[in-house]
Image (cartoon, rainbow, N blue to C red):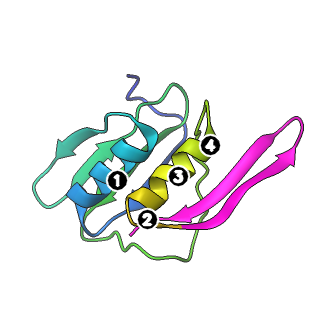
Amino acid sequence: MNKSWSNRFEIPVSDFDRARNFYEKIFEMKVEVSDFGSFKMGIFPHKDTGGAIVQGEHYTPGPDGVVVYLNAEPDLQKVLDRVEKEGCKVLQSKKQISPEHGFMGLFIDS
């Protein structure tokens, strides 16, 4: 895993363990946890743009703000199905963006 990211995003969370379990289950991946005491970071596997869930003093989760698109290859529908199984809400079902850009869906985690 390359830890020198040229671009990255952070998703604020209030319940770190719940969020880590949620993302690990829906994407069937392992989130690498770094615990700095008052700040926790769960790093998603990545090649280029890095991302993480974060919990700390200056991070407030909420439904408004930047929309983050995560790669759900090879099957977006399977990921969206797992979102609902984890008790979260799909806001937009699978929809084709365009033939060259593939599909998208939107969900909100708990």
Q: In the rendered view, would you say 64 is above or below 51?
A: below
Q: In the rendered view, would you say 22 is above or below 13?
A: above
Look at label 1 and name its amino acid: Phe
Question: In the rendering, which numbered label is found on residue 76?
Answer: 4
Question: In the rendering, which numbered label is found on residue 109?
Answer: 2
Q: Secondary structure at mark 4?
A: helix
The front one of 6 and 56 is 56
**x%, y% of residue 72?**
58, 39
Q: Secondary structure at mark 3?
A: helix
Q: In the rendered view, would you say 9 is above or below 15?
A: above
Q: Secondary structure at mark 2?
A: loop
Q: Secondary structure at mark 1?
A: helix
Q: Residue at horizontal 53%, vertical 45%?
A: 79
The answer to whether marks 4 and 1 mark residues whose Cβ atoms lie closer than 8 Å is no
Q: Is residue 21 left or right of residue 68?
A: left
Q: Earlier in the sequence, mark 4 or mark 1?
A: 1
Look at label 3 and name its amino acid: Asp
CA gap, disc 4 and disc 1: 16 Å
Q: In the rendered view, would you say 87 is above or below 76?
A: below
Q: Which residue carries the number 3 mark?
A: 81
The answer to whether marks 2 and 1 mark residues whose Cβ atoms lie closer than 8 Å is yes
Other-residue count near label 1 (Cα within 10 Å), few / some / many at <14 / 14–19 / ≥20: some
Tell us which disc is closer to us: 3 or 4.
3
Q: Earlier in the sequence, mark 3 or mark 1?
A: 1
CA gap, disc 3 and disc 4: 9 Å
Residue at far right of view: 99
Quarter holding residue 70: top right
Other-residue count near label 3 (Cα within 10 Å), few / some / many at <14 / 14–19 / ≥20: few
Instruction: State the quadrant of the C terminus.
Output: bottom left
Q: Which residue carries the number 1 mark?
A: 22
> Is 61 a magenta residue?
no
